Image: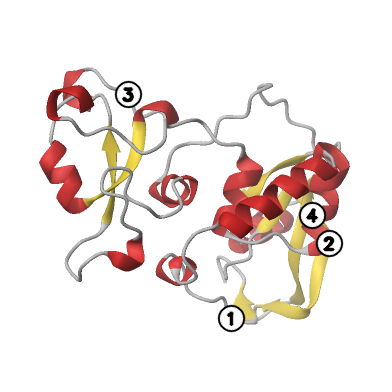
Amino acid sequence: MIVGCLALNASFEPLTMVPVKRALRLVIDGKAEIVESDPAKFVRSARMTMPRPAVIRLTRFIHVPRRFRRQVTNTFLFARDRYRCQYCGRYQAELKPREALTRDHLIPISRGGTNEWTNVVTACSPCNLRKANHYPHEIGMHPLTAPVEPHFVHLSWAVRRLTPAQSHYIRTFYGEQMLHQLEALERRGTPPDAHHHHGRHERHDTKLAGD
């Protein structure tokens, strides 16, 4: 299980999940402060040792669009689709040794398609190769579910489980109902070994970035 760091705006509103090293760099550069940390885990360098941050808060307020749009990456795309090919229905754990999950564009880039959440789906390599640059209706390959832009909280839960401290801020700004939705998502979830294919366990001691 990979546990990232929840980044809050200066107003304490949750913004996004960031890697621990990125959070540390923001703190070291004076752009953020540590709000919650894990006292059992530490980050070390030749010059300092500190508890590993679980929640950071930006020191300056940043304005964000009403609908926060996260860039599409394979990590979050696969998480949205629960590590399952949207054409044949196989989960990552069911793929053959030389097969892999890939990104497929419903409307191919070569035919004017865009790299947006509503135009991309998870596809195993054989299905991606078969679909090639066709439209879904041209080859009879339609995704199991319509692609949508997910809420970042759902993505964060799908990729890395929120800690109790992080959940507190989600509950404060998004309400108890959001946490219930996340718990329901986890129960439906991906196959038990899906997370093992998409990230290694973090060590308890982490070196500070740049040291």
Q: Reply above or below: 33 against 196.
A: above
- The reply to whether dot 3 and dot 1 touch (C-beta < 8 Å) is no
Residue placed under numbered mark 2 in the picture: 36
Corner quadrant of residue 39: bottom right
Measure the alpha-carbon separation of dots 2 and 1: 19 Å
Measure the alpha-carbon separation of dots 4 and 2: 12 Å
Amino acid tagged 3:
Thr
In the image, taking residue 181 as reference, residue 57 lies left or right, namely right
Measure the alpha-carbon separation of dots 3 and 1: 38 Å
Measure the alpha-carbon separation of dots 3 and 4: 34 Å
Residue placed under numbered mark 3 in the picture: 114
Residue placed under numbered mark 1 in the picture: 203
Graded by Cα atoms within 10 Å as few (under 14), some (14 to 19) or many (20 or more), the crowding at tag 4 reads: some
In the image, taking residue 33 as reference, residue 88 lies left or right, namely left
Looking at the image, is mark 2 or mark 1 earlier in the sequence?
Answer: 2
Could one spot residue 44 in this view of the protein? yes
Residue beneath the point at 67% across and 79% down: 44
Looking at the image, is mark 3 or mark 1 earlier in the sequence?
Answer: 3
Amino acid tagged 4:
Ser
Graded by Cα atoms within 10 Å as few (under 14), some (14 to 19) or many (20 or more), the crowding at tag 3 reads: some
Q: Reply above or below: 160 against 119.
A: below
Residue placed under numbered mark 4 in the picture: 167
